[in-house]
Amino acid sequence: MNQRRVLVVEDEPTIAQSVAARLRGEGYLVDIAGDGPSAVAAAAAYPPDIVVLDVMLPGFDGLEVCRRIQADRPVPVLMVTARGDETDMLIGLGVGADDYLTKPFSMRELAARVAVLLRRVDRAASVGPRQLGPLRINAAERRVFLEDTEVHLTPTEFDLLSSLATRPRAVHSREQLLSTVWGWSDAFASRTVDSHIKSLRRKIGAELIRTVHGVGYALEVPR
C-alpha cells in the first residue's frame, strides 16, 4: 500500500510540529498548513488521505476549510479545537468532519483516531457494489447513486450508510453504529450519530431511514 498522506492544519507552530512529528513517526507523509487559504491550496496541490484540522484559524476558520475540501472530494477530517462545546462539535460534524478531538489531547490518542478513520475507508472499499431499492452503493469507488443521480456524501456519511446497508430493514442501535463506524463508544457521542443521520436523510431522502425511538435506525428499502 502507498504511504498515506496527512494534511495537518494548525496555526500554532509548536503544536503543528509536534503532531507532524508523531504522525511521521507512525509512517505517514505529512504536510502542514497554518491558515485557511493555505490549507485549501495544500489539499488541492497534494491531495491528502486524511486531514487533521484545527477549528480556529487565520484567514478563514476550519469549518470553512472543511466545507471547501469536502466540496472538491470526500476525505476523512479529524477536527481539533480548544473548545469542548457540544454546539461546536455538532456544527463541525454537520459540515463534513468525521471525528472530533478537544485540546489538550495526547499524541497517542490523535494517532489512534487517524488510524481508525483510515481503516474505515479501507474496510468499506473491500465490499462489492450493492443495489438496495433506489440506492446503488459502490464501496470500492466510495460512490452512492439515488436512482441515476450521484449523491455526494462525506466519508463518515458513506460509512454510516454502508453500515446500515449491511442489514437492510434491521434496526441498528446508536451504540452499534458508533462501534462499527467510529470505532469507539461514548454515551455523549450518540449525538454524533444523530447529527450524521440528519445530514444523510437530507441527501438520500428521509423516507429511506427509519427512526426507532430510544433504540436506533434502520435503512428502509423494498424487499
Image (spheres, rainbow, N blue to C red):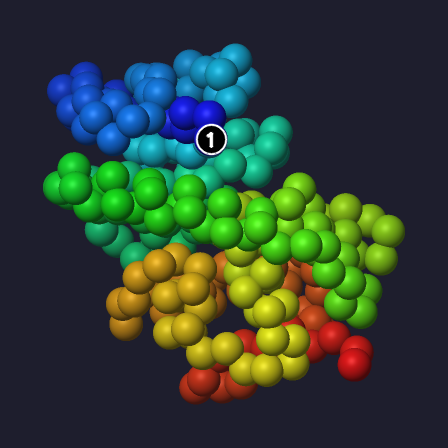
- Does any portion of residue 40 appear in the rendered image? no
**In the rendered image, the vertical position of residue 41 relative to residue 210, given as above or below:** above
The quarter of the image holding the C terminus is bottom right
Q: Quadrant of residue 52?
A: top left
Residue 102 placed where, x, y %?
Answer: 22, 46
Residue 109 placed where, x, y %?
Answer: 20, 45
Residue depicted at x 25% and y 31%: 26
**In the rendered image, the vertical position of residue 67 relative to residue 221, given as above or below:** above
Q: Which residue is mark 1?
A: 1
Q: Is residue 40 left or right of residue 110?
A: right
Q: Is residue 48 left or right of residue 167?
A: left
**Mark 1 nearby-residue class (10 Å; few <14, some 14–19, many ≥20):** few
Q: Amino acid at mark 1?
A: Met
Residue depicted at x 23% and y 41%: 110
The answer to which of 198 and 173 lies nearer the viewer is 173
Residue 41 placed where, x, y %?
Answer: 49, 15
Residue depicted at x 38% and y 27%: 6
